[in-house]
Amino acid sequence: MLSRLSTATRVAARLPAASRVPVSRGYTLDSFVGGSGNSEKWPVTRTNTILNIVPQGEMQVVERLGKLHTVHGSGFYFAIPMIDQISYCIDMRERAIDVMPQAAITGDNVSVDVSGVVYYQFTDAERACYGANNPLYSVRQHAQSAMRAAIGEMDLDEILHNRAALNAHVKGAVQESATAWGIDVKRYEITEILPDRQVSQAMDKQAVAERQRREKVLEAEGEKTAATLESEGIKIKLTNESEGMLIQVKNEAEAEKVKLTKEAEGESHAVMLKAKAQAEAIALVASELQKPGGEEAAKLALAGTYAEMYGEMGKSSNTMMFNQNPADVNALLAQATVAMQAASNSGK
């Protein structure tokens, strides 16, 4: 125990004042500092105070005369001073180790710097203490080498777009070795991928070109959509106009049909009324002819009408009509009598 304290004192004396870790609480440590400034300490020890208390989430490994004696969980226990030594205090909670940026060559010969974080948890205190001299350092180094090997098998585009596969590959490789060190690797996450300057500039140009291409495509699609909508509007307008004209023609034809039907019905009704009136007139004349003196009166009226007809024909036409006996009144009466008999027969 005294040798460990003296070693810790010498290490602390070599470190700068800002990075020295006080050992007044009885901790002895052999530490290394990562590239991110985050230090992982191993091993962490504690001074035997006879009655020792183990915090929750921690396990303490006690060695008796340099040999493993027992492993204590949270609670308290008694240890013999000068004989029992608390050689390891192990935090059993999940923790993280920063993996410093590592230069690697991708499958398509692009130089990249990749950094990550390993999330781990101790599950077996005995293996953690005696499986490796420094299990945390071993995990870090193995994660770096596995990451470089995985990157060498992948192209840059695949690394950038398929980080999940790379994370799973590194996690599986580290877990395979970490089981013997009492460590369960929960997951591995890539934090940053930095290609070299020339590749970064080329990627920036490619991104600008892609954005310009998308802009042009969107403009073309917008113009296409506008033209399509405009043509659809014209089509709908013409369709509506033609349908309206068709409806108008149908309505006009229907109106003309109704008009002609009504006119025909009116003419038919007028003809029927006229015929009925003529029939009634003929019947009335026939009935009057049956009365005493009716026939002589009809003859005289017909003869007068006949004479008047000849007069009108003479006025409106150049045709000259001569009767065989123009001064023969009896001949006119005879003609009138024949006409009356014909009318009487048609009325019967």
Image (cartoon, rainbow, N blue to C red):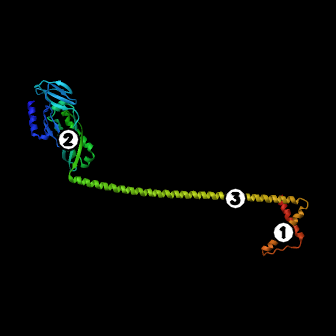
| Mark number, residue 306 | 1
Lower sequence index among marks 2 and 3: 2
**What element does badge 2 sit on?**
strand
* Residue 266 sits in quarter: bottom right
Of the pair 227 and 177, the residue shown nearer to us:
227
Tag 2–tag 1 contact (CB < 8 Å): no
Nearest to the eye among marks 2 and 1: give it.
2
* Residue 176 sits in quarter: top left
Q: Amino acid at mark 2?
A: Asp
Residue 261 in the figure: left or right of residue 63:
right
Q: Which residue is mark 2?
A: 98
Of the pair 89 and 149, the residue shown nearer to us:
89
Q: Amino acid at mark 3?
A: Ala
Q: Position of residue 51 (x, y in %)?
A: 16, 24
Q: Residue at the spot x=61%, y=59% of the render?
A: 252
Q: Which residue is mark 3?
A: 264
| Mark number, residue 332 | none
Q: Marks 1 and 3, Cα distance to the nearest angstrom?
A: 35 Å
Quarter holding the N terminus? top left
Residue 214 in the figure: left or right of residue 322:
left
Q: Residue at the spot x=28%, y=55% of the render?
A: 208
Q: Is residue 347 visible?
A: no
**What element does badge 3 sit on?**
helix
Of the pair 23 and 123, the residue shown nearer to us:
23
